[in-house]
Image (tube, rainbow, N blue to C red):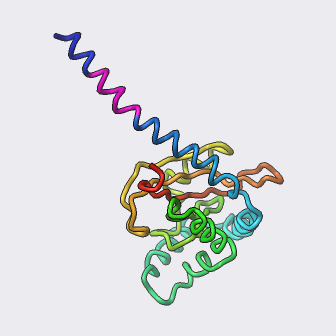
């Protein structure tokens, strides 16, 4: 009886692990094949480097204040914190990547070395990502690191999506300068 219960439990464990491994593999393949070819474009590297020069001296109180201002501006017409992030050349580049993906990519945003948004294809729910796994498991871990979230319903994109996050690496210096998160439409990819 114990042996058959153990066998059944082991079989169930491997049956539930296989889809998760397939999901993770598919997301990593999508990252390598579809995202990395444009992830270190000059427009993104230049935008991140420029913002790093500005935000390097920010205190945590500065970051918290900016994050609170961002959140308060969502849905408003006057958006002095949000508009510079979503209305710049790097954000235009990201919106072009979303459009070119034909529905597979739902959103993209790029962060500086502090985890603050630099560019975004659309408004994110907050400005500071530095306290989230999408930043803490990528930027400090260097080139090649990644974080893949679970599939969840995303209010901002109105889709079930998973997020792939990874460091932004300057190809000229091989230095990690920021991080990025790409929302992937689960229905389109899987």
- What x and y, as percent, mark residue 66? 53, 74
- Looking at the image, the residue that sits furthest to the left is 1
The quadrant holding residue 19 is top left
Up-down relation of residue 88 to residue 183 (above or below)? below
- Looking at the image, the residue that sits furthest to the bottom is 77
Which residue is more in the foreground, 165 or 105? 105
Which residue is more in the foreground, 14 or 165? 14
- Looking at the image, the residue that sits furthest to the right is 172
The verdict on residue 31 being magenta is no
The overriding secondary structure of the stretch rendered in magenta is helix
- What x and y, as percent, mark residue 95? 60, 71
Residue in the picture at 55% in, 58% down: 182
Residue in the picture at 43% in, 54% down: 186
- What x and y, as percent, mark residue 98? 57, 66
Up-down relation of residue 177 to residue 70 (above or below)? above
Image quadrant where one finds the N terminus: top left
- 88 horizontally vs 21: left or right: right
The quadrant holding residue 97 is bottom right
Which region of the structure is painted magenta?
Answer: 9-18
Residue in the picture at 50% in, 63% down: 103
- What x and y, as percent, mark residue 42? 77, 64
């Amino acid at each position: 009886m114990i042996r058959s219960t153990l066998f059944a439990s082991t079989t169930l464990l491997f049956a539930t692990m296989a889809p998760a491994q397939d999901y993770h593999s598919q997301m990593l393949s999508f990252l390598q094949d579809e995202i990395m070819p444009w992830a270190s474009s000059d427009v993104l590297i230049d935008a991140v480097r420029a913002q790093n020069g500005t935000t390097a001296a920010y205190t945590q109180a500065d970051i918290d204040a900016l994050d609170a201002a961002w959140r308060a501006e969502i849905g408003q017409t006057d958006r002095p914190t949000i508009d510079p992030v979503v209305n710049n050349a790097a954000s235009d580049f990201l919106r072009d990547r979303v459009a070119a993906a034909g529905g597979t990519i739902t959103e993209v945003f790029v962060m500086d070395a502090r985890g603050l948004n630099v560019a975004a294809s659309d408004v994110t729910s907050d400005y500071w990502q530095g306290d989230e796994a999408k930043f803490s498991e990528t930027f400090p871990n260097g080139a090649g690191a990644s974080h893949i979230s679970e599939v969840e319903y995303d209010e901002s994109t109105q889709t079930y999506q998973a997020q792939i996050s990874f460091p932004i690496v300057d190809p000229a210096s091989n230095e990690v300068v920021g991080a990025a998160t790409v929302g992937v439409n689960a229905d389109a990819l899987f």
